[in-house]
Amino acid sequence: MRIRLLTRRRRVGASYLAVGTFLTLILLATAGTVNAQQQMSKRYPGGKNVRVELRNISGTIVVESWNKNEIRLTATLESKKAQVVPKQIDDCLMVDVMSDNRGRGDVGDINFKLQVPANSSVDVETRRGNISVSNIRSGLVRAHVSSEGDIELTNISATQVVAQNVIGNIYFDGEFSSGGTYEFKSTKGDITIRIPGNSAFRLVAASQMRQIKLNDFWNNGFKTQDGRKYVGDVGDGRSSVSVTNFSGQITFLRK
Amino acid sequence: MNCEQCQELIHDLVDGSLSHLDELTLNTHLKQCLDCDSVRQDLTSILSFCQTHRGEYEAPPNEQALWLRIRNVIEAETGSHAQTAAREPSFLGRLMGRTWELSLPQLASLAAAIVLLVSLTTVVGLRRWDGDGSVPNVVPQAQASNINDRIWQRRQVINYWNQRVELNKTRWSPEMRETFDRNLKVIDEAVANSLNELNQNPHDEVSEQMLNESLNDKLALLKEFSDL
């Protein structure tokens, strides 16, 4: 009887020890992960014609405007060996992750957040990862994903907009300026364009899978080639819009 | 003084440029040698004639008639050559012997005519060969090979970049490799679809545009990932 009691106590003790060890390991692992990530944040003075150029390898890019005449760059680096060295020349801020990390091997994801004046030109690209740009009114907004990643451009008014990826959706919500050029291209993904009803543009839209929905922007002046390509003017056609995808839907929405 | 030395000095004697001693020696020889003295007399006569008639040239009696005679002689010689050529009986010989002077547009037209003639002959020959007058699969196959020819060069460039990517791929993370392969596969599917459409309808503008764009995308993907 005595022997049996002792054995039960030992079993309970061993269970507590196992659970404790397990929890400790989890805590250590989590702490290790947190410590491995680095974060950097820097501010740069903004001029009259601010331009931001960012070349990332892997990771998300978020660009948004704020009411300050300066640029704030925040980066979260997954790997300790990764390096980010922004360069500012006049009004242009350049970040080239590829150059900064040449010869360092795989540097993991680097996620960027840029806060810029609303009139900044934005030119960002990444090999892999999502891109989001919002509230920009300037000459250029270019978002390029070399492989897969969604592109979301919200409240954009720029004379030149380029959005391109291979796999992933593209969403544009903004205005087409008179005389501007707008290019949206995805190999496999939906492209949605939300613009004011009074927008005026010349459209060339092509989709191999015949999934083009012009909705309120359709008129009888459009020429189509068996539903795979539409060419025509909306309004006076003063801006030029090109939309292409291979599989996925092209949709125009009125806001 | 011998005769050879004397005749060398005669010109100077006539010109009056000899020294007194040489002139004395030469005159002594001339008095003894009739041949040398004859040479001196001839030379003196020629010189005297030239000095007397300096600036006077006698024109031919009828200059125009002279030139007509020369031209007649030349034309007579050319005519005899032509008669000789006319006697050649072979048409091929004449054709080969003829000098062809063609301008560049004439040459191009001639080449085009030859190509057209050869093409027509080939088509007609193939129709007859088939018996029923139809030429099944010949034109689509030619068009398909034409499409392949057009993209052949781009495929070479793509192969080059593909090799570079393969060399660097080992350094990438497994996630990056999967991403790349997945995206390349999607683009390859787009290329294959466009090519398939073009093989069925070689003049399909949309498929051609899609093919071009997907090949451009593939090249861009390879280039951008070759840097990693």
Image (cartoon, coloured by chain):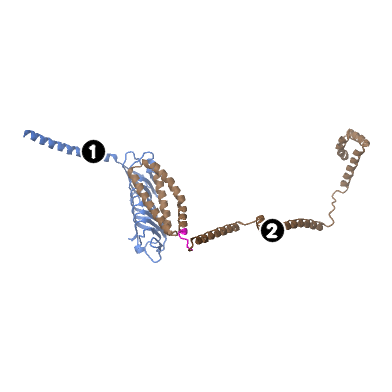
Chain colours: A blue, B brown
x and y percent of residue B209 in the render? 42, 56
Instruction: Answer with the quarter of the image where residue A18 lies.
Output: top left
- Count how many numbered circles sit on residues in the image: 2
Examine the structure image and report whether residue A94 is included in the region drawn in magenta. no
Residue drawn where x is 34% and y is 64% of the image: A216
Q: Looking at the image, which is closer to me, A177 or B183?
A: B183
Q: Which residue is mark 1?
A: A28
Q: Is residue A101 above or below residue B96?
A: above
Could you tell me which secondary element the residue under label 2 belongs to? loop
x and y percent of residue A241 in the render? 40, 58
Instruction: Answer with the quarter of the image where residue A159 lies.
Output: bottom left
Residue drawn where x is 22% and y is 40% of the image: A26
Residue drawn where x is 13% and y is 36% of the image: A11
Could you tell me which secondary element the residue under label 1 belongs to? helix
Instruction: Answer with the quarter of the image where residue B24 lies.
Output: top right
Q: Which residue is mark 2?
A: B89
Quadrant placement of the C terminus of chain B: top left
Q: Which range is magenta?
A: B133-139
x and y percent of residue B75 in the render? 76, 57
Badge 1 amino acid: Leu
x and y percent of residue A184 in the render? 38, 55
- The nearer-to-camera label among 2 and 1 is 2
Badge 2 amino acid: Pro
